[in-house]
Image (tube, rainbow, N blue to C red):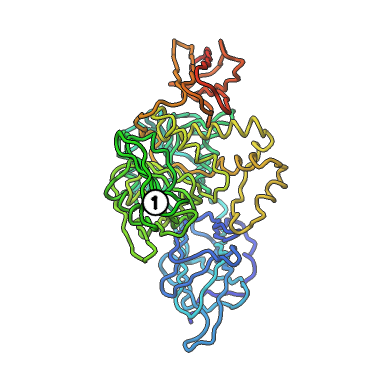
Amino acid sequence: MAWPHLITLFSLLAPQDGVENTYFLEFAAGERRTNMEVEARLVLPNAQDWSSAFFPAPGESRLTATFVAPAAPRQAILEVEHLSSSAKVEFGGSSRIDVLVNGKPLVREWEVGTHVFLRDRLALTKMLRAGENVLELRFASGQTAYWLKRLEVQCVFPPDTVFSEAVERLDGGRDYAVVVSRRTFADAEWRKAVEALRERHHATVLVHDGPVALVRDALADLMPRHAAFVARPLEASRRYVIDVHRLARALDDDPYSDVFWGIVTGYDAGDALIVASDPGPLLVRRAAAGCGLDLTRFAEGRFYSETQQSVMFERAPGGEVEQKTCPADATEQLVSTLNEWRPDYFATSGHATPYDWQIGFSYRSGQFRCQDGRLFGLDLAGRVLPVDSPNPKVYGPAGNCLMGLVEDRSTMAPAWIHSAGVRQMIGFVVSTWYGYGAHGVNQIFIEQQGRFTFAEAFRANGIALVHRLATRFPRAAAVDIDEWGIEADPELLTNLAARHGIADRDALGLLWDRDTVAFYGDPAYEARVERVLEPAWSQTLDVDGDVFTFQVATVRDASWHRPPIAFLPRRVRDVEILEGEELGPVIADDFVLLPFDGAFAAGQTFRVAFRTRRR
């Protein structure tokens, strides 16, 4: 084996004048935490402890971590916490790895310790450079497996090094903003998506260094109606989604989101360009699902039951909903539905991971998986059934865990965009157990029958969630959760509740959902359900100068699944309620909400009038 630069007894970085910074990757409590861009191939979570990852495939398993250094470091150390295992086999019983830095070998055929995690350190000062640096771990050879718990690149930069937090503004209109990292903007192919959005929406572009939260002041100054966050899949992580949620609520003093936002991404830059360039609109007439779906609210549709094996329901145009028999394993039928029947809307539920959807909740069936950006069905007979469904559609996997989590480009969300024509989708980036944050999006979008676009339904549901949390559980509303690994820690929810003094399950559920549903797509893309059934209430918003009148009239006996809301055509301030104050309306700078809950009877009318000034 080669040993250049190996220093297993190296002390901590020698004290010297300079600016210290650490780039890290760690696996803890079932989560991958990092401040680098990480892409992995055949690197799997260790289900035994959920605090490491293992490389099972010699010659194939590899992990790449990329970071941008503001200058060439004066000193740099790579620290790795890892282990191998041993076995008495013919060709040697331990596993070896190669470590490459910027394409050059730092160490090859590195035989690490066995049985217990050890920390090894390698000097790599001369191999790093100002700008982009790429660190790669390759499982070179061996008979067992290799486990990785944590790696760090510890750097000391020159004393005058500046870690930029500047936001560059490329002016356009004020109604639409495109937010993009400097590295993505510098990529010629990804920049095409930015330019497409800028041209279509006359947008202002905000280019940032560092975390996306740094654009807060620039975005608040602009206060656009729509904000698209163009992100490569290595950027669009769980942390990124959570940060965008919190950023969207931090633009003014109220607790509600202030923009219609979406993350424009895909398996590759071509996907992002397709999403950014599609002018729409999409009229949703044909719907399909691998779970229950109210087909009476679509012109035509079909769904395959996730609780009753061999059962499906179908509605032909102008017909009634009919129950039918389907194969016990409906994988092929679902793939055919996407490829040949080509719905405008698709929904899934049940068990899922970032890498698959498991068809059928209460019975054994096939799966949807992905590889190299391509979705495919895998039935119980082992047949691979490729998904090729290019027609534009929206995707609502409200009942799936982790379907919105983009850990790297090999996950499901980019594949839905790449090979299933998805223009907009929602999805949890955590395991879901409460569901308000996603199910309400589908309810508003479908039940209100074209009143809201898919992006508007997403924001309306988020506003309803924040209102419910703030009014019923104001102490909990002030909490930010930053631990999500319930797969690894079954006591996490109990511990979070105890730590933050949360006694109510609903409070914890709302808090869990608030920042964990991703929205992918151009937020200005207009996807609406074609109205085939009158909603349970009608609503109107009339504008007479500076006076707005919001009226809701119930059409039939029903329940408020989410409170009535209307988005104002412009931002306002200095609100004076003229009528309906007893209804407790919530009037923000661009929406009005009536906080109704529970059942209602037909024939009721509610009216709020208010005077404003233009913002």
Q: Is residue 402 left or right of residue 334?
A: right
Q: Residue at x 66, y 32 (%)?
A: 472
Q: Is residue 170 visible?
A: no
Residue with the most extreme bottom position:
90
Which of 158/529 is in front?
529
Disc 1, SS:
helix
Q: Quadrant for residue 283, please give it.
A: top left
- Disc 1 residue type (three-letter): Pro
Q: Quadrant for residue 435, please give it.
A: top right
Residue with the most extreme left position:
340
Q: Which residue is mark 1?
A: 414
Report x, y in % for residue 464.
Answer: 55, 31
Report x, y in % for residue 90.
Answer: 48, 89
Q: Image height check: is 88 above or below 403?
A: below
Report x, y in % for residue 454.
Answer: 41, 35
Q: Assess disc 1: are there few (<14), some (14-19) or many (≥20) residues with their C-alpha within 10 Å of its C-alpha.
A: many
